[in-house]
Amino acid sequence: MRERRLTKDSQTAASSHVGAAKDRSKIAAIIAASSGNLVEWFDFYIYAFCAVYFAPAFFPDSDPTNQLLNTAGVFAVGFLMRPIGGWFFGRLADRKGRKAGLLVSVLMMCFGSLMIASLPTYDSIGIWAPILLLLARLLQGLSVGGEYGTTATYMSEVAQSGRRGFYSSFQYVTLIGGQLAASLVMVGLQQLLSLEEMRAWGWRIPFVIGAVTAVVALFLRSTLEETSDAATRERPDAGSLLALIRTHPWPFLTVLGYTAGGSLIFYTFTTYMQKYLVNSGGLPLKAANQVMTGCLFLFMCAQPLFGALSDRIGRRNNMLLFGALGAVATIPIATALGSQPGPVEAFLLISTALLIISFYTSISGIVKAEMFPAEVRALGVGFSYALANALFGGTAEYAALAFKAGGHESLFFVYVTGMMVMVLLVALRLPREARYLGKAG
């Protein structure tokens, strides 16, 4: 009897040890996959932060406004490349494997950053300087467009059932972390270097940092195990855009719908909000920067909590809460922010908006991946996301400023609210259980 009990205890201990080892392996895989996501978004945002310094080096127009418009145009091209990146890397990941897509994506971003860091100026090579800058930005936009879908697919497949929401939430932890890291690097350089040094050569440093960290991410991703199987990759429909739209039209349109609303409100309360606080809310620029840094940090930390919540209440309920609360709260929050709030009030208001958005961002990848079969999963997630993100997320700031210039700034937030109503309607039609990858709720 005692020997049986000892044997049973030994088996239980061995089983616990194996379970713990599997958990550690999954956590390591999540870290490796999401590390590249952080690097990708660091590199993408650092361009926007550095533009004011390197604009004269590539666009010799004497008017600073024209210089910034030119660099902004190159930045916008990055968004236009995202659907192409979503298609290219989605097809690659579905036909050649998730690991291949993850490695090529971060390698392309590394090359783009290194290219910008070492580009000669207009004084050295003339018109080729802005042309090469545009080419580097095209590579970065292509890379970012493919990063989202491939990472979301891999993280959804490697995470264990019952905790997929929690694990997949780290995709947005690193996405927001990349934006924060870019901001902190710029603040540090501004403290260490003079304005003349930043314009002369200091702006190159962040791109070098991005290229070096991309190499680290490349090494980490090289250790990943493939999550797709050869039989799935060899199917005739694997990575086929025609098969995706013909066979899975409803999931494709569903992802387009709530990505459109999700991207729009995300960019409204992150990248555009700093300008809104200064131009409409009357907050000093330095105070606005501090408020947004604090809000983004809270936003980043909230992702795992909301991801874990989705594991308990279901992804559908998360999306319903996102659509309903976003539709109800957007206009009141925006109105309060535009009525001369203090820094503390602004922080609380924006944090409230970002916590509502967290119902979506924390499960953004997994709720999309659960809607597609393995042979078109990376393509289905990546292309639909990139297309909606480019059309609605990438145009959020332009639309907001256009409404403001026309004297109808409040109508922009009516537009955002309307998109949240659409998200709510789409969420109502989401199944209570996922067809693929197990129960979703």
Image: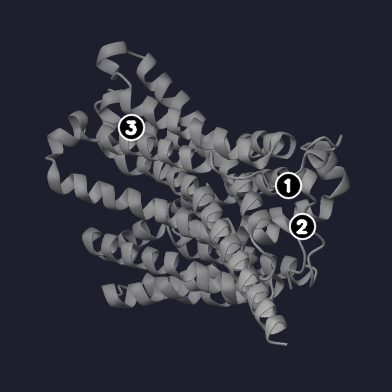
Q: Residues within 10 Å of mark 2 (few under 14, many from 20)?
A: many
Instruction: Name the kind of residue labelled 1 in the image.
Output: Gly
Q: Residues within 10 Å of mark 1 (few under 14, many from 20)?
A: many
| Residue 134, above or below 438 | above
Residue 208 appears in the rendering: yes
Label 3: element kind: helix
Q: CA distance from mark 2 to mark 1?
A: 9 Å
The reply to whether the C-beta atoms of the residues labelled 1 and 3 are less than 8 Å apart is no
Q: Is residue 55 left or right of residue 296?
A: left
How far from the left and from the top, in percent, is residue 125? 31, 12
Give the residue at x 30% y 18%. 120
Label 1: element kind: helix
What residue is pinned by disc 3? 66
How far from the left and from the top, in percent, is residue 277? 33, 63
Q: CA distance from mark 1 to mark 3?
A: 39 Å
| Residue 306, above or below 100 | below
For marks 1 and 3, the one nearer the N-term is 3
The reply to whether the C-beta atoms of the residues labelled 2 and 1 are less than 8 Å apart is yes
What residue is pinned by disc 2? 371
Residue 323 appears in the rendering: no
Label 2: element kind: loop
Name the residue nearer the viewer: 8 or 20.
8
* Disc ID at residue 169: none
Q: Is residue 423 left or right of residue 299?
A: right
Instruction: Name the kind of residue labelled 2 in the image.
Output: Met
How far from the left and from the top, in percent, is residue 164? 64, 65
In terms of image quadrants, where is residue 215? top left
Nearer mark to the viewer, of 3 and 2: 2
Q: CA distance from mark 3 to mark 2?
A: 45 Å
What residue is pinned by disc 1? 380
